[in-house]
Structures are given as structure tokens and as C-alpha cells.
Amino acid sequence: MRMSHLFGRTLREAPGDVELPSHRLMLRAALIRPLGAGIYSLLPLGWRVVRKIEQIIREEMNAIGGQELLMPVVHPADIWRESGRYDAVGPEMSRFKDRGDRDMVLAMTHEEVITDLARQEINSYRQLPMLVYHIQTKWRDEPRSRGGLIRVREFTMKDAYTLDRDEAGLDAQYQNQWHAYERIFRRTGLAFVVVGADTGMMGGTASHEFMALSPHGEDIVLICPNGDYADNREVATFVRDAPTGEAALPIEEIETPSTTTIQALADFLGIPLAKTAKAVFYTGDSGQFVFAVIRGDLDINETKLRKAAGEGGLTPATVEEIRAIGAEPGFGSPVAVHDALIVIDESVRDTPNLVAGANRAGWHLLNTNPGRDYQPDVVADIASAEAGFSCPVCGAALTAERAIEVGNIFKLGTRYSNVLGANYLDADGISHPIVMGSYGIGSGRVAATIVEQHHDERGIVWPVSVAPYEVSLMWIGGADDTAPQEAADRLYDALTAAAVEVLYDDRPERAGVKFNDADLIGNPVRISVSSRTLERGEAEIKLRTAADAEFVALDDVVPTVRRILDGLYAELSGEAQRS
RNA sequence: CGGGGUGUGGCGCAGUCGGUAGCGCGCGGCGUUUGGGACGCCGAGGCCGGAGGUUCGAGUCCUCUCACCCCGACCA
């Protein structure tokens, strides 16, 4: 490709309001352009990157027996009503009517459609197992898109679906996907960890997320330094202190003015946070009041609490709602409240004599104990794991890292096949629901995440497997001396003939402009020729990652580049990376 | 949805006290230059996000509205 005809210009300055390195660099390098909030066009350079990522995904899906198909972006609402998700999913799913006044939706995922296909096409156990996938546009009207291609509303995702006779079959396919994902991300040059995760709106029995570590990630993962354990913070557990076995003391009400926070209370009484009970109030989606209690040194994990309370969602309770159950904001405790589901963390069960609110402004209770002073409805682990907490496997101090979710794998089980009636007959003629799994990778997000992990102050530093082009070629010098241009033209033809992907900067620009654009776009190999190199019959070859260049005879450029590229590709097929 | 911020040429920005819009980069032409974002001259390009209002007069003041960005809530 000759840069003089490339559609899309590089930007010297990025728009002032972009924050993430990937967002800024992808704009500057002419990979993407915004159309609206969370809606982007992929320019030719960006589209090449995404297509390469998708091709890697395709190859690895095919390698484990996947069959590619394509499902629609527009769905009749009825299929979503059948699965029960038409009402369960909120405004994140966009709905509209067609000309016949029929309810339609824009696809945010494709479980319904694949299950509908499965019930039509699969009849017999002889047809199972099956793995199908597609790479398709999805629309999710996110309440907040952000960060360039990291979180968008319209995006492209590979989603694969497995169809099996039983759990054992699902387990096997789940493992196949896991390993395929490891190969995919290794080949794209991403450093990642695999973590256990919440199953969220998808329903299902198990899920893992493939997390690319990045300071700009939206998720937090807890990782054991010994490699024993890694989980999304949503579900992460940790080793608790052993119960003290302290005897229960008499409850006592004391005046504690101006102590509306746990810290203020602990300071006022001169006790550690771990001797206090913190009350947090929510209203569940079902309408019930959820009264959560946790030891003062810990924080509530809302995902865990949601599950413990059996709620689909939780919203912080209003002051009016809190008073309505007999509690007082800032001085709340479960003692003598009513019409509330009381969920206490294990820490509250195991730590006697905690100081809790008196449900009366300015007063607290010393020595509260569940079972004696109030009856918890649920005792559960509702605590958020933090850096430094003990690994549940080996006890080492966990680290907390920010990460971007680039892929996930889900065991759906029979959640969809049951309700949609996707069944098969076994050898005995007995009907069973198909056991399903679903597996997603966002290709645009992968591209942006690679940039997050692979850039420097000059621009993007692409792994060769996903670079827009393998080589940036340029001539340097004045327009009057045509020798460098002619030499570069010949190299362009020779490299192209050797099937090397070349972005040829044939523009009459000064050296600095060409070097800077090449660094910004970030192709892994740079070749330049000038009157200076031609004096010796040479071209300059420099890796994007290297500080220095090497000089090779013009006739040796093609084989040298081939050897360099082969080496770069080989590096990416090494061991799975962890950072 | 809550909080904060920004809307002025393609991009980055300035615009004071209300007086009819400017700078840098980029873009087109000519010339000089030519290995890390050159220089000179000439030139094109603006519904100052939109609507309403105040005023003799609004980029500037007021009201409403829309869009985008950031934080939070939310989220495969």
C-alpha cells in the first residue's frame, strides 16, 4: 500500500478529550474514527488489524472443530420473549417495530437464535457434540461507553456455541475453548490471566474470563503470586481470620455523637475497625429491603450480596426507605428492625461483641451478637477481597490488578434449551435438552487492548501477527535526487512479490515526518533508503522495538526481512504469557 | 441515571468590559530546503453545537435544549 493513497491521515495531535493510550493512538494512527458515542468506523489500517485478529480466532476455532456460520443482527422480539430475556434485559437492548408493527430487537448476543437453530437442526444424539460460531456485529446500548474501542455500543464479537449431550461433553468442549483462547491470545501478543467470574445475565453454571492486565482495565482481578488462584473480584474469596471464641458480653447502649462513619466511630471509641459492624442498605429488584452487615474493616461485594439475597439487582436504599424499616442512616444495626432481609457476612458471625448502630441518631450498641440480639436471615460470604488478603488456596498475600476482559467462556447448561425446547433423542429414544456453552471474544476490544499493552511514547508497537502491515518502507531525500525513490520502488515491488505486507511511504515528505508516522503506526519492521545508504548499495532495516538499525545490501533486503518476520512470528508461538 | 467538564475552520486552542472572530498545526499554489514533525510568500476554509430571550448590537449575558468527554452507578 502506498501511503500517498492511503485513506485516513495520521494526526499530529489527538482530540483533547481522549484519555486512554489506545484511544489516543488509534485515532492518531488513523485506525479508527468516531461516529457517535460508542460508535466507530474502522479505517483501512484499523480494519486490517481487526481482520487479522478475527482470522487468528477463526483458525483456532476451526482447529477445534468449529463451523462458522452467520446469525442476524435484527431479531424478532418473540424469540427473546420465549427465553424470558425480553423483559429481563433492560434498556441495554434496543427495541423497535418494523413496518408491520411487529416488535423487533437489535441483537446484543445470540443464545436465542442459536438455540432456535439447534431445535430445528438437531434431533439425535448422533449429531452431537457440535461447535458453531460466528463473528458478528452486536449492539448494546451501554449506559456509558468509554475509552475508544475498549467499551463501545456497536462492536464485533466472535461468539461460539457448543451443543452437547451431557455435562461431560460440555466440560470437554469448555476445556477445548479454554485452550483455543490461550492460543489465540498468545498469538495476538496479549499478556493475560484466566479468572473465575460471575455468570451475570447469561445464566449458567460456570464461567471464566480471559483478562488482559492493564492499568486502564475496568475489572479488578485478584491473583495469587504463587499461581494458585485468580478470580475476578466479583467472586474472589479469601481466607478469613479464625474466630476468636471470645464470650458474648452484655449489650449496652452508649452515646456516640457525630459518628456517622465507621472510621469516626472507631476513632471515637478507640477501637479497631474490626470491632465494629457496618450496616449497608439496599433495595432489591424484587422490592425487598436488603440489610447487609459486615465487619467494619471489610467492604461489601455487591455481586456476592446480590446472590446471597437472591436478588437480580441492588440499588442503594434511600433515607426514607431506611427509616421505614426502623433503622437510622449512619447509626444502623439489624437490632429491632423489621421488614428487611438481614444478610450478615461470615465475619459478623465469627466476631463476637461488635459495636453496631442503635438505630437512633448519636447512639451505638456495644457487644452486639447475631442470634442473641437479632436474627440474620442469611449468613454468607459477602465480603470484597482486597490486595493483601490471603489466597484461599495457599494463604499467600493476593495482589489486585486492573484488567480488561477480552474473552469469556460460559457453561450455559440447559438454561436456553429447556425454555426454547431444543431437545435431542438419545439411543433409547428418550428426549433430553441439549447442554450448551457460549464463548465470546470482542475483536475490536482485543485490538485496543493490544495497543494498551504495546505502545511507547512514539506510538503503537504492534506484535507482527496483528500489525496493519508487516513492514513500513520509505525513501528519504530530496525530490531532485530520484535514486532513493527508484530504489524504494524496486524494494516495494520485490517485497510485495515475496508476499511481504508493505506500507510504502512514497510521499514527498521530510525524513522526520516519515519516521514519526512509521513509529506512530507501529509496523514491526522499518526499511529506509536514502542517498546515504545507496552510496554503499544498502538499505537500513530497523525493528520498531529496537533502538538501532542494521544495514543490509539491497539484494539481501527481501531474505533478511523474511528471516526477521519469521523470527517475530516464532516468538508469538511461545509459552502463554503472564505478566 | 447522579456528579464534573467541554462545544469557536479538519485538529489543538485563544477570544478581556457585549461592538460584527483570531493563533498554531493541517490543507491548496509558488519558491527555497531535504535523515527525526523545515522556511518564505500567496490562498481557501467559520450558522462560534441548536432554539428562544435580553440588548441599538451577543462567540461573550439569561433560559431551555442537543452532543461529546471524564468519574460513579450499571454492564457478556
Image: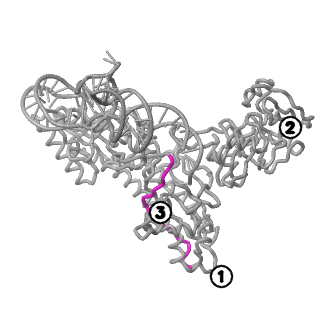
Q: Which residues are the magenta region?
A: A126-143
Residue at mark 2: A368
Q: List x then y, in percent, for residue A369.
A: 86, 40
Residue A245 inside the magenta-drawn segment: no
**First along the sequence among labels 3 and 1:** 3
- Give amino acid for label 1: Ile
Label 2 marks which chain's residue?
Answer: A
Q: List x then y, in percent, for residue A265.
A: 77, 28
Q: Nearer the viewer, residue A442 or B9?
A: B9
Q: Is residue A409 left or right of residue A459?
A: right
Label 3 marks which chain's residue?
Answer: A
Pointer 1 with pointer 2, Cβ within 8 A: no
Q: List x then y, in percent, for residue A105.
A: 47, 63
Q: Secondary structure at mark 3?
A: strand
Q: Secondary structure at mark 2?
A: strand
Q: Nearer the viewer, residue B68 or A337?
A: A337
Mark 3–mark 1 Cα distance, whole angstroms, equals 35 Å
Q: Is residue A567 visible?
A: no
Q: Nearer the viewer, residue A453 or A206?
A: A206
Label 1 marks which chain's residue?
Answer: A
- Count of marks placed on residues: 3
- Give amino acid for label 2: Thr
Q: List x then y, in percent, for residue A317.
A: 68, 43
Q: Say which quarter of the image contains residue A57.
A: bottom left
Residue at mark 1: A430
Q: Is residue A513 left or right of residue A107?
A: left
Q: Are marks 1 and 2 on the same chain?
A: yes
**First along the sequence among labels 2 and 3:** 3
